[in-house]
Image: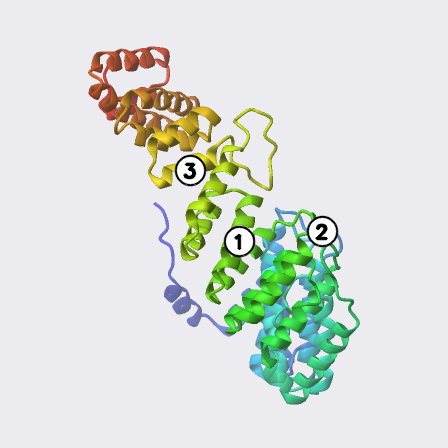
Amino acid sequence: MARSRSTVADLQGFLAAQSPLWLAGRLLAAARRDPTLLAELEVAASGGSGVDVVRRELGRALWVADYVDEEDAPTYVAEADRALGMLDKLISDGPTDGVVELAEHAMDLLADAVGKVQDEGDAHTSLCWAQEIHLRAVTAARPDRVGLAERLFARAVADEWGVFTNVVDDYGKPLGAAGRRRLRELIGQEVGRLPRLGPGQSGDGRRHTVLQLAERAARADGVDAVVDVLAYSLTSARAFVRICEELVTAGCPEQALEWAERGLRECGGGRVDHGLGELRRLAIGLYATLGRDRDAVELAWRDFEAAPSLEGYQSLHQHGQAEQSWPGWRDKAMMVLHAQPRLGKGQSPVGPYHPPGHSTLVHVLLCEGDVDATWRAARHGGCAEGLWLSLARRRAEQHPGDAVPVLRRHVDTAIATAKRDGYECAAGLLAELGTYYDRLGASADFAEYVQALRKANSRRRNLLAAFDVAGLPR
């Protein structure tokens, strides 16, 4: 007969009934197998702060000489967290002079270990906990504030794992006014040593860390101070976008537009910069906000011409309407779209994604509701398969026969996936296709088509089951 599992209450009752000598023996036996438990008992038995014992346990549990593989990583993290728990308890029991230094020692050990532990980020989580313990320690122990600021600055600029990203805000209370002033002074001095970078230039990780710290420190002084920090790295259009976003949020659209125009001048010199489109669209919105409709529509045109898209066309339409010049802009846009290379005619990709053939033209005409013109454009220049399906459904409203070959092509594609969801998709398309055949008076042809599919795929039981669920002809 299986033994019933004891509850915590049962165990508490059992242990309470045992003699101290028996309990001590069992506890010591367990401690011999568990170094962390042994260290905890030593701290309790010392009658003092236990700093030396905890230091020894941190060294044992956190130090990684070479690496920890994926199989052993959970054990490492569990041991590390138990050791950190001992450190955390020291603070709760009452801060001592050695606890702050001990917390910094723990962070050093873990910062070195994180890159050597093959896990899913649990060791990094332990490092973050060590930083939280350090914050508690310095808050409780109240060390020299200027000295603390200097140590925190040194740690923050050398931080590879992002645990001191918010040092300016996180440590505000233990630093006090004097410490905060010294920390900002050190950050400012370091920023002053950095060169200002322009488009195409790049900096190292330390530079990035210093500017992150400076940005957070500058927020206490307002948006102009933040912008001054961000202006140290105008390496791409995205850097200008960030400055504009800060200024817009602060209610300074005129200044934001000045930065946007500068970014367009400096980043638009032929070098590939994937942030240029975003910067152009931001500037278009700023022109419109400031009532400069002509400038908005002209920049919308340049944006559309640089990378024709449905979104760019809609932006051009919006601002062309506002400026009451839309018909002329539409004619120019259509010339660009009709000039796009036809599918398979040597089209070269532009940017991370370039829609095939006349996809953009098809999408635009479809959104405008001109189904006949859309159908002609798709047949002439080709388009993405997903667009063909959307277009075929619209075309079927008046011309179901034109939609039939498109849906049949998608049925074949769905079956070819050889997956259950593909089979269900194919069955759904066939059910839709059956309505088109019915409208054409060709229900018998549809039945023959489905029967031929069943025969050709007789070994695909999941496909045939999907056909049956959809009520397709047998």
| In this rendering, position of residue 399 left or right of residue 50 | left
Using the rendered view, name the quadrant where residue 465 is placed.
top left
Instruction: Classify 90 as above or below 440.
Output: below
Distance of mark 1 from mark 3, alpha carbons? 23 Å
Is residue 91 or residue 371 the one in the foreground?
Answer: 371
Distance of label 3 from label 2 (alpha carbons)? 54 Å
Foreground residue, 107 or 196? 196
The earlier-in-sequence mark between 3 and 2 is: 2
Q: Nearer the viewer, mark 3 or mark 2?
A: 3
Disc 3 marks a residue whose amino acid type is His
Q: Name the side, left or right, on which 266 lies relative to 2.
A: right
Q: Considering only vertical position in the picture, is 21 above or below 139?
A: above
Give the residue type that dot 2 points to.
Answer: Tyr
Disc number for residue 67: 2
Q: Is residue 8 visible?
A: yes
Taking the spot 29% from the left edge, 20% from the top edge, the residue there is: 401
Q: Earlier in the sequence, mark 1 or mark 3?
A: 1
Picture coordinates of residue 109, whole percent (x, y):
71, 64
